[in-house]
């Protein structure tokens, strides 16, 4: 995983909104009968470039979701968001899931499926075209989307790295 610009963020500094991506009921068969437990994938973000995901497992749904939120707060990252969209096209991979993100014109909206939509809305992206290829497993799709967002570079850092002016980054 090529994590270029991993900027950790403290959860105490910002107002975070959580989105439940998926709940999975798991059954364990014992000699006393079936034991049910739940696993929940939760994505949290401040809708201003900060996002994190977490997995919680518990005997009850509410406890699983709460554990997921706590886990998500531990791995928050900062993502460049430019004028309500992403800076450039990007492909993200995790396990069998591949995601493709493409910037879109203002007014397009978030064109993305299930698990990707939750991540992109939590980041604060308003306009984006996205396609999920390969595995549709929510765990993998969320991680692949986060992977794609981690590889995003905003034009200012690109200009600094190359040692050129900002308009040269756009014009070539």
Image: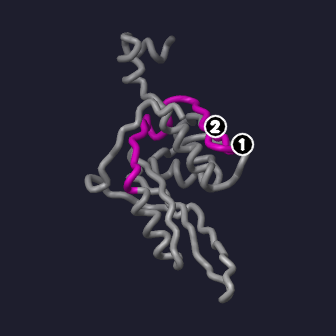
Q: What residue is shown at x 36% (from left), y 11% (from top)?
A: 163
Disc 2 and disc 1 in contact, CB within 8 angstroms: yes
- The colour mode here is one colour
First in sequence: mark 2 vs mark 1: 2
For the image shown, how many numbered marks are present on the structure? 2
At a point 42% along the width and 53% down the height, the residue shown is 45
Numbered mark located on residue 133 in the image: 1
Which image quadrant: the N terminus? top right
Q: What element carries label 1?
A: strand
- Mark 1 Cα-neighbour bin, 10 Å: few <14, some 14–19, many ≥20: few
Checking the image for residue 119, the label placed there is none
- Residue 159 in the image: state x and y as whole percent: 39, 17
Marks 2 and 1 sit apart, C-alpha to C-alpha, by: 8 Å
Residue 123, image x, y percentages? 45, 47
Q: In this view, does 111 lie above or below 30?
A: above
77 horizontally vs 128: left or right: left
Q: Position of residue 93 (x, y in %)?
A: 62, 38
Residue 100's disc is 2
């Amino acid at each position: 995983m090529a994590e270029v610009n991993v900027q950790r963020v403290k959860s105490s500094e910002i107002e975070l909104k959580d989105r439940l991506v998926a709940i999975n009921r798991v059954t364990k068969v014992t000699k006393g009968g079936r034991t049910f437990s739940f696993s929940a994938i939760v994505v949290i973000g401040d809708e201003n470039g900060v996002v994190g995901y977490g997995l919680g497992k518990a005997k009850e749904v509410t406890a699983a979701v709460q554990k997921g939120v706590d886990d998500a707060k531990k791995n928050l990252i900062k993502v460049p968001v430019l004028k309500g969209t992403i800076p450039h096209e990007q492909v993200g991979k995790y396990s069998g899931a591949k995601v493709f993100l493409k910037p879109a014109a203002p007014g397009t909206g978030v064109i993305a499926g299930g698990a990707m939509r939750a991540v992109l809305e939590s980041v604060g992206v308003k306009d984006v075209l996205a396609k999920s290829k390969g595995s549709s497993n929510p765990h993998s799709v969320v991680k692949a989307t986060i992977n794609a967002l981690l590889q995003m570079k905003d034009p200012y850092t690109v200009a600094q790295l190359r040692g050129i002016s900002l308009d040269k980054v756009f014009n070539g």
